Image: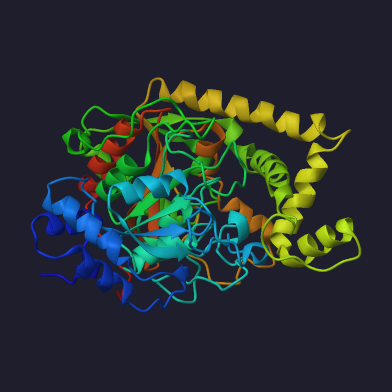
Amino acid sequence: MSSLTELSATEIGALLRSRGASVIEVAQAFASKEDTVGAFITRSAPDSEACARAQVMIDAGEGSALTGVPIALKDNISTRGLLTTCASRILSNYIPPYNAMVVDKLESQGLISLGKTNLDEFAFGASTETSAYHVTRNPWDLERSPGGSSGGSAAAVAAHLSPVALGSDTGGSIRQPASLCGIVGYKPTYGRVSRYGLVAFASSLDQIGPFGRSVEDCAHLAAVISGHDHHDATSLPTDPISARDLKTGSLKGKRIAIPSELFDDSAEPGVLASVDSAIQALKGEGVEFVPVSIPEITVGVTTYYIIAPAEASSNLARFDGVRFGPRESGDGHVNVVAETRGKLFGKEVRTRIVVGTYVLSAGYYDAYYLRAQQVRGKMAAKFEQVLSTCDAILSPTSPCVAFKIGELEGDPLALKLLDYCTIPANMGGFPAISLPCGLSDGLPVGLQLLGGISRDEDLLQLAYSVEQCLGVKITPPKM
């Protein structure tokens, strides 16, 4: 039998239900592995009581496909009694008094927490290099980035430190690191997973979603964490995402759109070649590919980097050193707040707050923020039009493979352009998933599928069929 840590989450769940291993045995197997990639900020020993409760559920034939399975959580998801830092010094001592709704759902289904993973500070970044604590490394090459902002969660799954993980996706922060680390990352429809307890970056764009080693892993985890939540005003009044019909789909007759704007020379030749090979394999299974043009894609990054900082500047106003977190000294209240925010926020966070405040200010709101929202609406409408006649939209997930740590440090625009292919899904609230489709220069390439609003089950079913057709199973060389 393979080592416990080499199994997928679905395989571990099946093993537990067959009594081939105990919950505590599986949890300890993952917890005892050395974190050589810096995936975690806070690593917690498996809770023996939680393991015992999960074991009772399994023995009674209750729970879900993932009951008893270990999981890692991005450190911007609130966990009662466990440090939640958002990889920022301004929350270095913050322990939430409550759980995020997704954490309550995980606990109710008996998943076992392994701790909190590293991220770009407040999820502002695409490389996990802006964390105030340490840089996370890609398991495929320790000199390279795992992507971001959920780089710690992606690296944890790719390095077999956890079978599944949760991240958050504001402009591609689940899908892009999944692509760079050679795993599956899924962003559900906006509103199908509660954001209650997620430390907000950009409230109209943020969405919690799963990482796994297969589409099946992500589908089962999505089923656990999704569903309506009255605590979240943006939560959709829909049932939890179902994985029941995941394996019943067929590729024959599917219509998939190919936007020319996502296949231009901004992507590396090796990435395009790998995605094209996948397209040819899918054609052989009866998929019809429909060339389309969505010109609004070309201004997606510009539009995003007006809307996201604007919302971030508002959301981060609460971090003032008064109500929670460390506090710097100063003469009077105003100086205390200024010193706290000036010294404890990192450079990228400060920059986005300044940009966001500027575009919301009197005299500039209409020219920037309002205009960006209008462009966003047009982009979403165009995607909806394409999806009214197609089952999905296909593209590379990332225009490049994993880049070297520090390589793009002096080129902030290049880092932002890494989200070129992923931003449209957030702008319209569409579900999207990245799955491995091959290698380029020995590094993983991700293929993205984007589906219609609330058609998550259809997208996951299609992604599963694509995964089975491509048969791509890649693992970091040293794993």
Which part of the image, by quadrant, shows the N terminus? bottom left
Figure check: 114 above or below 142: above
Colour logic: rainbow
Left or right relative to 338: residue 227: left
Residue at horizontal 67 percent and vertical 62 percent from the top: 325
Say if residue 39 shows up in the picture. no
Q: Nearer the viewer, residue 228 or 474?
A: 228
- The residue furthest right is 331
Left or right relative to 364: residue 185: left
Left or right relative to 245: residue 274: right
- When asked about the image quadrant of residue 311, the answer is top right
- When asked about the image quadrant of residue 139, the answer is bottom left
Say if residue 75 shows up in the picture. yes
Which part of the image, by quadrant, shows the C terminus? bottom left
Figure check: 90 above or below 406: above
Where in the figure is residue 402, as x and y percent of width and height? 47, 64
Where in the figure is residue 98, as x and y percent of width and height? 50, 50
- Tally of numbered discs: 0
Residue at horizontal 41 percent and vertical 50 percent from the top: 103
Where in the figure is residue 220, as x and y percent of width and height? 27, 45
Where in the figure is residue 295, as x and y percent of width and height? 59, 31
- When asked about the image quadrant of residue 32, the answer is bottom left
Residue at horizontal 30 percent and vertical 33 percent from the top: 457
